[in-house]
Image (spheres, rainbow, N blue to C red):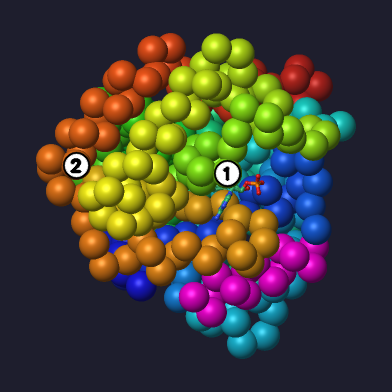
Amino acid sequence: MEQIEFAKSGLMTSRIGLGTWAMGGWMWGGTDEAQSIATIRSAIDRGVTLIDTAPVYGFGRSEEIVGKALEGSLRRKVTIATKVGLAWKDGAVYRDSRPARIRKEIEDSLRRLRTDVIDLYQVHWPDFETPIAETARTLEDLRRDGKIRAIGVSNFSPTQMRMFSANAQLDAVQPPYNLFEREIEADVLPYAVGAGLTILSYGALCRGLLSGRMTANTKFDGDDLRNVDPKFQGKRYPQYLAAVDELKKLAHERFGKSGLALAVRWVLDQGPTIALWGARNPSQLNPIGDVEGWHIDLAAKGEIDAILKRCIVNPVSPAFMAPPVTRPKEQEAA
Ligand SMILES: NC(=O)c1ccc[n+]([C@@H]2O[C@H](COP(=O)([O-])OP(=O)(O)OC[C@H]3O[C@@H](n4cnc5c(N)ncnc54)[C@H](OP(=O)(O)O)[C@@H]3O)[C@@H](O)[C@H]2O)c1
């Protein structure tokens, strides 16, 4: 499997990372622990050495599952990327990157993950009520103390990353990036390339939309976020499905590959990127081998752009996933 070095930290991982948000169950209509553990172990068998999780995924559940799956000799084989800076109360999520919260959260994550060090620690969302410098310095202190190896931010703008980097050595950034969500090309992507950051592209399959499995009749269970995701609603959904059909045809005719393989390959051919691929059962990882050993040439990239422009007349960003920007008042004194 292709590898990438996190230039400043010395970490090296596979360019495909396993995403474990859905394994937490929350916002994905529930989870199956045994299947999740089997999926993590299957990913490692297939050469994946990066597992991305977060405390908020299932309010601790995803981290616990990752910890269980890796306990013992597997832990040494993988890079664990988790996050910090989202808190929750009664199912409501809010941003909190204050130093005291970070120092508590890391102990909770280490315990759930059954490890004594987190390889990549990422601030999940910018907290507008805490100075970025304070957050950055706290993470640098954790690195100095040997609790984390590398530092990342997620959903940060270039301006926020500049402020962060003035106070800590930033190694990676985790933005949304896939064929249907390309907003970072205007700012975050060029900034990250210039600053030598590794880019962990999240939602490589656009929450399954680019997997090729979705049809007009696909239904999602319970609290599955795709019941409210604007790409899966109303007049937009058929536009995205039509684009998937055309992308499938192009992938097949030009490269003899599936639409899913094209989507993941495209992310990897855009720069110093990692594709975070969420899966909840081992068979969903069967196409991994199809992503390796080929590239999308410039002409095909042009055709892809034309397909997207032709099919998707009402594009929409992934902004619906952003948590509220202000903390509940009772948390201010906490
Ligand atoms: N930093 C952030 O703010 C942030 C935000 C979002 C995600 N992330 C990270 O990025 C990771 C990936 O993103 P994501 O999980 O949201 O979305 P994703 O990778 O775009 O899509 C995941 C979904 O795609 C479907 N899928 C995967 N392989 C498939 C296959 N072979 N055939 C058919 N369907 C397949 C599954 O859907 P079904 O459930 O229908 O089976 C799976 O749950 C997350 O797990 C998380 O680690 C980070």
Q: Residues within 10 Å of mark 1 (few under 14, many from 20)?
A: few
SS for callout 2:
helix
Q: Is residue 170 magenta?
A: no
For this rendering, which residue is in front, 105 or 215? Answer: 215
**Which residue corresponds to the image point at 47% horizontal and 62% vertical from the top-left?**
287
SS for callout 1:
loop
Q: Position of residue 165 (x, y in %)?
A: 32, 42
**In which quadrant is the N terminus drawn?**
bottom left
Q: Position of residue 297 (x, y in %)?
A: 15, 48
Residues shaded magenta:
33-46
For this rendering, which residue is in front, 327 or 271? Answer: 271
Residue wearing tag 2: 300
Does the Cβ of the disc 1 residue fall within 8 Å of ligand 1?
yes
Q: Is residue 98 left or right of residue 300?
A: right
For this rendering, which residue is in front, 163 or 80? Answer: 80
For this rendering, which residue is in front, 305 or 11? Answer: 305
Indicate the quadrant where residue 301 lies. Answer: top left
Q: Is residue 182 above or below residue 300?
A: above
Residue wearing tag 1: 213
Say what amino acid the circle numbered 2 marks. Ala
Mark toward the start of the polypeptide (1 vs 2): 1
Q: Position of residue 103 (x, y in %)?
A: 64, 51
**Which residue corresponds to the image point at 80% horizontal and 63% vertical from the top-left?**
33
State how far apart marks 1 and 2 are (Cα): 23 Å
**Which residue corresponds to the image point at 32% horizontal and 48% vertical from the top-left?**
251
Say what amino acid the circle numbered 1 marks. Arg
**Which residue corresponds to the image point at 74% horizontal and 35% vertical from the top-left?**
220
Q: Is residue 36 magenta?
A: yes
Residue 169 in sight here: no
